[in-house]
Amino acid sequence: MKGPNYWSIRRHKLIVMKLDLEDLEERPTNQIPGFLDRLKVMIPSLYEHRCSENAPGGFYLRVEEGTWMGHVIEHIALEIQTLAGMDCGFGRTRGTGEHGVYNVVFSYTEEKVGVYAAKAAVRIAEALIDSKEYDLAEDIQQMREIREDERLGPSTGSIVEEAEARGIPWIRLNRHSLVNLGYGVNQKRIQATVSSQTSSIAVEIACDKEDTKNLLEASNIPVPRGVIIYDEEDLERAVSKLGYPLVIKPISGNHGRGATINVSEWDGALIALAAAKKVSRSVIVEKFITGLDHRVLVINYNFVAAAKRTPAMVVGDGSSTIQQLIDKVNSDPRRGYGHEKVLTAIKVDPMTERILEEKELNLNSVLQKGEELFLKTTANLSTGGTSTDVTDLVHPHNVFMCERIARIIGLDICGIDIMTDDISKPLDESGGAVLEVNAAPGFRMHIAPTEGLPRNVAEPVIDMLYPPGSNSRIPIIAVTGTNGKTTTTRLIAHMAKTAGNKVGFTTSDGIYIQNQLVQRGDCTGPVSAEFVLKDPTVNFAVLECARGGILRSGLGYHNCDIGIVTNVAADHLGLRDINTLEDMARVKGVIPESVFPHGYAILNADDELVASMASKLTCKVAYFSLNENNPLVLKHCNAGGLAAVAENGYVTICKGNWKIRVDKIINIPLTFSGKALFMIQNILPAVLAGFIRNFKMEDIRLALETFIPSPVQTPGRMNLFQFKNFQVMVDYAHNPAGFQAIARFLERIDAKPKVGIIAGVGDRRDEDIILLGNLAGNMFDEIIIRQDRNLRGRSDQEIIDLMLVGVNQSGGENKVKVIPKERDAIDHALKNAKKGSFITICSDVVPDALGQIMEYKEKEDTFEILEEDIPNQH
């Protein structure tokens, strides 16, 4: 799970593991000899888990009394993540309704670590049950490595945390550090500490050491003397000109890659040249400036922070070897793997080995007491260096100089490396120099210094990207329900477009950006929602949210402005452990529960399960009903609430006890002159949504009267075709509620015979498929049973037999024919259509069915034109 979900609205990052206990369902923990003792030895920190006892040791007590293995695995999965440096505390284990099968749910920090923890927890439990040895340390290290590979870096992470604290939404765009802040037209991007506002030419200049140095020197900024070289011959001339000690580094590069400082002899210079040339073809050689290494951070051309950096080092005690001293430094609890803690553990790498070799030392050498040994040539935190905050010590002259440097280079987020003995003195007095200007400077040394005051350097970044008064979001209207959600979504999108918005919307037909279909297919899940929210041309989002996506991954956003639930009816029951209408209502209820407190949930007052969702909500509520005298609506409006009803032939908004008549029902094409009552049920929440968003009444009315039920605007939703002697309607109805809505419409249609092309859906329960057949038997005079392309786990004959059982139970004298392929079934119905008949096609693949019918229509129209032209030719 990545967003609000069935298991938790507030906790978005959850792993849901379906676990079959098999024979362990009959063996709780108190029936497994020695299990608790082995668990305490392997993971003693589980003592802190309070469980339902709400006290330390509570979980152990539950294990002692006897609990099921799913519950144990939940706690193990949580604790091993905590041991790996990711504190995760939420978990629950619930039965699925199937004997011995549970959903084990627990929180994660990094998704891939969570998945690993789920599988590892099962392996650990199995080892404990069987009393086998298990290497828990290997799992812990593996999870740490996965986290370091997957997590946002500390700089990007700090910016994202600051954005979250301000309610700014974000979406990660790749597995590295590219992040979208905000939605739609209001989005900004960051990658590490480069923003979408950062000048690309400024980055180019900063990455070219020669250009940077020339610009600074021309502006009278103190920089070290240096020359550009390409080979050993150039290096020899540079050494002769500048003299030792030297700094040798690649022209293009950052974060200290390929740089070597304090080079004091020829062999070391050759090694440094080779290291630099691995990064860049050209290399800069500078006079090494002695002093302390400082990093000054300038954001939006304002001084923000400064830190003194010290390379990884050890101090001798007269008895310990260098390796032992390194181990002692790494034992500091502030040091960890990668970026997991304030400091990074020191690793012995080729740079360290070269330093030791130059000093004629090795890892077994013993340093004298108090002797300092630097183990790296650069002071980067990622290689074990340390930082001390000196923000308050920087001299005003140096502050002015650094802000000026940022302007000279043109960098909005700028790291300036300064070498000086005393940052509290002007640089021209201390004899220091500016060594480098860095694009994408690291924030870690400022947000978590080894010593001194941490600085929230992400704050000015967000201030720059989103100044006070600016907006990071776009309006989001989310629509769910068993039936009608696609039509409601499309109507709201049409209404928003009519009101002048640039709309992106998702439906079961595809993703639309400003009415252009950009992706075809069922796009009602979180990935499709993010697709719209990431689009930089969209300023209004309408998102259809179906059951499947909510259960698979949760919602694709954290909060919406309006959440609509059209209805809850029997469909997809028995799938993904959703077995009752109440279960389904809890799934659909995720949408209104995700509405901002200042937003609105729009609920169907005629549906008891939907109306009851209001009791769990913290947002405002508006209701809609086909009955203006609905008791809930009356009570709500008497209390000053908002509702929409059908009354006296009008679509009407009730604001308190005042009525605002929007339009006559017969003027709204979607209602088929008032015959399609269920379409009115789709119109009412759409009108409410437009009213809540302050659309002009004339825009709402215009949208209602220009939204034509057609293959273009409502594909597969009551698309009506008038042939010369008969009518054809294509609809996506595929569940009992959908069939009942079609039946009510057909009752108002004067046609004979009424023909239905229908199919059962293979992954539904037997009783649901039989009910479809029963309803069809009462709706149609003639029935053609076809098959979906995807039988979803059943044989075609099994589905046909169940449908026939239902048709026969209806008691009608229906003519029934079985034609498996939808195209053949449609072809048969059209070729054999009787005069005055009405053919209803409940289609599986709507675009194909519409295309086939339009081909027939074009042929008929062409033939009629030819017939009219023939007499004129004689």
Image (spheres, rainbow, N blue to C red):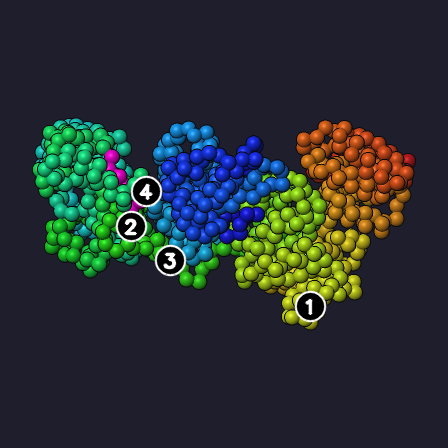
The part of the chain drawn in magenta is 338-347
Residue 463's tag is: 3
Question: Which mark lies nearer to you, 3 or 2?
Answer: 2
Residue sitting at x 81%, y 50%: 744
Q: Nearer the viewer, mark 3 or mark 4?
A: 4
Circle nearer the viewer, 4 or 1: 1
Q: Amino acid at mark 3?
A: Asp
Counting residues from the start of the chain, the first of labels 2 and 1 encountered is 2
- The residue tagged 1 is 635
Name the N-terminal-most of marks 3 and 1.
3
Q: Quadrant of residue 349?
A: top left
Question: Front-most of 635 and 556?
Answer: 635
Relative image position of residue 274 (x, y in whole percent): 21, 29
Camera-nearest label, 2 or 1: 1
Residue under label 2: 448
Residue at image location 22% in from the left, 34% down from the top? 283
Query: Are the residues tagged 3 and 1 within 8 Å (C-beta)?
Result: no
Q: Amino acid at mark 2?
A: Ala
Q: CA distance from mark 2 to mark 1?
A: 56 Å
- Mark 3 vs mark 1, foreground winner is 1
Q: In the drawing, does residue 505 fall left or right of residue 374? A: right
Neighbor class of circle 1 (other Cα within 10 Å; few <14, some 14-19, many 20+) is few
Residues at discs 3 and 2 in contact (Cβ within 8 Å): no
Residue placed under numbered mark 4 in the picture? 339
Q: What residue type is disc 4 on? A: His
